[in-house]
Image (cartoon, rainbow, N blue to C red):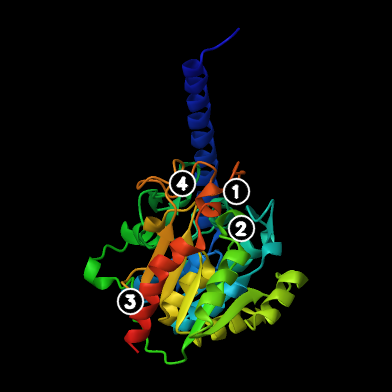
Amino acid sequence: MNFGYSEILIKFNIFEKLFCFSLNYFISIMRSISKSFSSSNLDRTVIVALHKLGDTVFTIPAIKLIQNKTKFPITIVCYKESKKIYELIIKNVEYLILSKEDFLFNERLARKSPNKKIKEINPKIVFDLTGVMTSASLLYNISAEKIVGFNRPFFSAIYSHFNIVGKLQHSIDIYLNAISTYLPFTNSEVKSAYPIKKNLTNSICICPFAGWAAKEWGIRNFISLAIHYSKKYQVKFLVEKGSIPEDIKLLLIALNIHLVETKLIEELINEINSSSILIGNDSGPIQIAAILGVPTFAIYGPTNPNFHLPFGDDHQFINQVINCTPKPYERLCFTNAGRVGCPSNECLTTLKAEQVLKKLDPFINHIFSKN
């Protein structure tokens, strides 16, 4: 029997609702069992924030708000790299460091060990600032009195205070919204922009890579910027060790452009912190620079700067608007920011160095005129 598209969609929606109901019913039972067999919760707060570098930075205003509004000692559950970021801003907290090996299926499903470690903390309150299956699999049988956060509707039974993933918010606001049902706040209580420091090093730092290739403008394009600015400023290329091909290394040497290869997150932070401005793609280094008070200029393609750009006048961007560029209400383009494959990547390949320089030159002049 053949079904029309609408009939198939109706059947899919019914199946999805049944699955959601069944999964939440199972989770409710597991939470009840956990609470009945647990001892009294300790006066501790756990914050689950399992993110890459850029999203780690986006969680900081929410964590600061939790810290200011709750009286219990805090343990942040995060990856090793994120701890180094948090330590720049967040003080007087403990950490439970997890690794990618603590999870299965591309970091989607927690093993027993990390779940056990959170149970041993026995917190009274848990804030989930991860909001995907990864954190749901960590928390589904935790006995905490309150679990606050956001996720897919499939996992709503885990939470005593629940929010659905926000789609039309800046990435910082997603995490603030996640805790708002339990910790209401005013805009004056939240500081999302970081103060810009005066930096007289006369140094421009270029980070040519991003979390995935579809967000990258291209290393040779960034080299053209380096050539232009090396006439007046100290320019350095900042990359992860082993990420640059040998021919590009030789080209940078020939052009007398300083190459810095970092292996540790501490090295990345120190190099960014010693710069006067950072130029890059939509990437973690841009966000790290923002919290360090370093001005940034970002090149956007398949992602929407409205949802990711650091706050403040000292953070600017450029993007090439084409037919498939994310609309004002879309976070990513239709290819999931290139992660499911893009036929041409024209949003970046058609963006010329001359266009970037036309906007970047006055921005750099503005930044250095303030020093």
Q: CA distance from mark 2 to mark 4?
A: 33 Å
Q: CA distance from mark 1 to mark 2?
A: 8 Å
Closer to the chain start, of discs 1 and 3, is 3
Is 277 positioned to the left or the right of 343 in the image? left
Closer to the chain start, of discs 1 and 2, is 2
Q: Is residue 33 visible?
A: no
Residue located beneath label 4 in the image: 157
Circle 2 crowding by C-alpha within 10 Å: few under 14, some 14–19, many from 20: few
The dot on residue 212 is 2
For the residue labelled by badge 2, is the local secondary structure a helix, a strand or a loop? loop
Q: Is residue 291 above or below residue 213?
A: below
Residue flagged by tag 1: what amino acid is it? Arg
Task: From the image, state whether disc 3 or disc 2 is nearer to you.
Answer: 2
Is 159 positioned to the left or the right of 26 in the image? left
Residue flagged by tag 2: what amino acid is it? Trp
Residue 190 in the image: state x and y as whole percent: 29, 71
For the residue labelled by badge 3, is the local secondary structure a helix, a strand or a loop? helix
Q: Are marks 1 and 2 in contact (CB under 8 Å)?
A: yes
Residue in the foreground of this view, choosing between 134 and 356: 356
Residue located beneath label 3 in the image: 68
Residue 157 in the image: state x and y as whole percent: 46, 46
Residue 54 in the image: state x and y as whole percent: 50, 66
Task: From the image, state whether disc 1 or disc 3 is nearer to you.
Answer: 1
Residue flagged by tag 3: what amino acid is it? Asn
Closer to the chain start, of discs 1 and 4, is 4
Residue located at (62% from left, 57% from top): 213
Q: CA distance from mark 4 to mark 3?
A: 27 Å
Circle 1 crowding by C-alpha within 10 Å: few under 14, some 14–19, many from 20: few
Residue in the foreground of this view, choosing between 186 and 202: 202
Name, please, the residue furthest toward the top.
Answer: 1
Residue 275 in the image: state x and y as whole percent: 49, 85
